[in-house]
Image: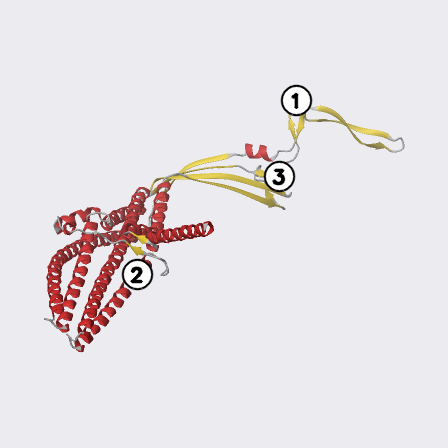
Amino acid sequence: MKTKTLLLLSFSFIAFNTFSQQDSVSNNNVWSLKQCIDYALANNLSVKRSNYDVETASLNYKQAKWAMMPNLNGSISYGYNWGRSLNPVTYEFTTQELNSINPGASSSVTLFNGFRIQNTIKQTQRSYHASEQDLAKTKNDVMLNITSYYINVIFNKEQLENARFQLASSQSQLDRVKRQVSAGALPRSEELNIDAQVATNEVNVANQENALVLSLLQLKQALLLPASTPLDVQLIEIEVEDFVLDQSRDQIYDLARQIMPEIRSANLRVESSYYAAKAAKGNLYPRLSLNGSINSNYSSASDRPRFIPDGGDPIPTVEPIGFIEGTNTRVVRNSSIPSGTMEDGYGRREQLKDNIYRSLGLSLTIPIFNGFQARYNWQSTVINREVAKIAYTEVEQALRQNVETAYNNAVAASKTYNASLRQVEAREEAFRMMEQRMNAGAANSFEYQVSQNDLFRAKSDLTRAKYDLIFRKKLLDFYQGKPLEY
């Protein structure tokens, strides 16, 4: 008995843990709208591409700023010469083989070039900030897209519940009619009519199940998730007072015009094109630069021992020049050599140190004629500036139209929702009364089917109107800078 009890408790514990784990996994698969949006923003390819566009614009901006700093370049060359060549240290011709080393460094800084560098910095700065706003616009598009798919899933969920409710109601009525037909209170045709209605409702349930599966698939695809990924969504709790439109379309547009990233981006593009034109115009002006360099050299022709005179009296010496024939007497000649010392070879370090030479100068470049390239480039940037202004106006007008359309759609959706709500209340009461008449034998199956179908259509219309209003109201909230979440 104890063994059986322990086995039973162990089995119960394992089963409980398994159920708890499955329940935990199920809960983890239920995503809120915020979770869907956060996941999409972290994995969407368009967002990632826009991030790289921002990084590229940032690098261009940094590069433009560093262009104001002096440049510095180092160089070193090594050569091997033979035959008649020039000693780079003594500048004398020599025929011996020699090695040479020539290190150097140079630097230059632009003092004036028509303010091209300064305007380029301002241009790339605006382009950088515009790319940031483009990234925000891409994120907004992703959020709206995910919100639409999310609400569509919830809409299909409620449609499926309506279809199941209709099926359950017709099945219940079929059971009641069967009993009445068996008792002889109703003809067989009534049972067949209700049975056909049940079959129709089963088809409706299957269609709504497929619509729900398809909407979930579309949401997964928007999230870049495989179709096999378990995913469900949280239902949105909406109160009627949440549908109140408390601002006019003009007020919403004025606010959207201040916060929408596409407006900011277009405005920054206009400013960027303005400074691009000024930078291009700078190429028409003279360019003044400050240049400097430092160099040295070494030659192996000078890298040998050498005599260094010290300025003293010559040193007398006796130099043998031969012998007298027959006597072998040595013959000498008196001479003298300069006073001084022999030093080691003139090595690399000494030569490179002694041969340093420096230069510093100003360079003025005056553009006279270059095939009108600078002028045509400047005129092209002026045209681009006008095009950017037109693009800004187009974005502004598109935003106005979108806000006005969204506002009108929200107003219409609110009216449709309220009308659908009253219609459902009336249809529910009518169907309740029809059921009473049907049960009392005062109505036939055809009248019952018509009443039930009317109720189902009314509920479907209400669900569609409800979630259409949810999305329209959420879209207006989005234009006012409110978060897309419930």
Residue at label 3? 300
Measured Cα–Cα span from mark 3 to mark 1: 30 Å
Residue at label 2? 218
Please report contact status of discs 2 and 3: CB closer than 8 Å, yes or no: no
Please report contact status of discs 2 and 1: CB closer than 8 Å, yes or no: no
Residue 173: tell me if it is visible: yes
Task: Determine which quarter of the picture holds residue 387.
Answer: bottom left
Identify the colour scheme used: secondary structure
Measured Cα–Cα span from mark 2 to mark 3: 79 Å
Label 3 residue SS: helix
Measured Cα–Cα span from mark 2 to mark 1: 104 Å
Looking at the rendered structure, the kind of residue marked 3 is: Ser
Residue 370: tell me if it is visible: no
Task: Determine which quarter of the picture holds residue 213.
Answer: bottom left
Looking at the rendered structure, the kind of residue marked 1 is: Gly
Looking at the rendered structure, the kind of residue marked 2 is: Gln
Q: Nearer the viewer, mark 3 or mark 1?
A: 3
x, y (%) of residue 397?
A: 18, 54
The relative height of residue 112 versus residue 419 in the rendered view (above or below) is above
Residue at label 1? 312
Please report contact status of discs 3 and 1: CB closer than 8 Å, yes or no: no
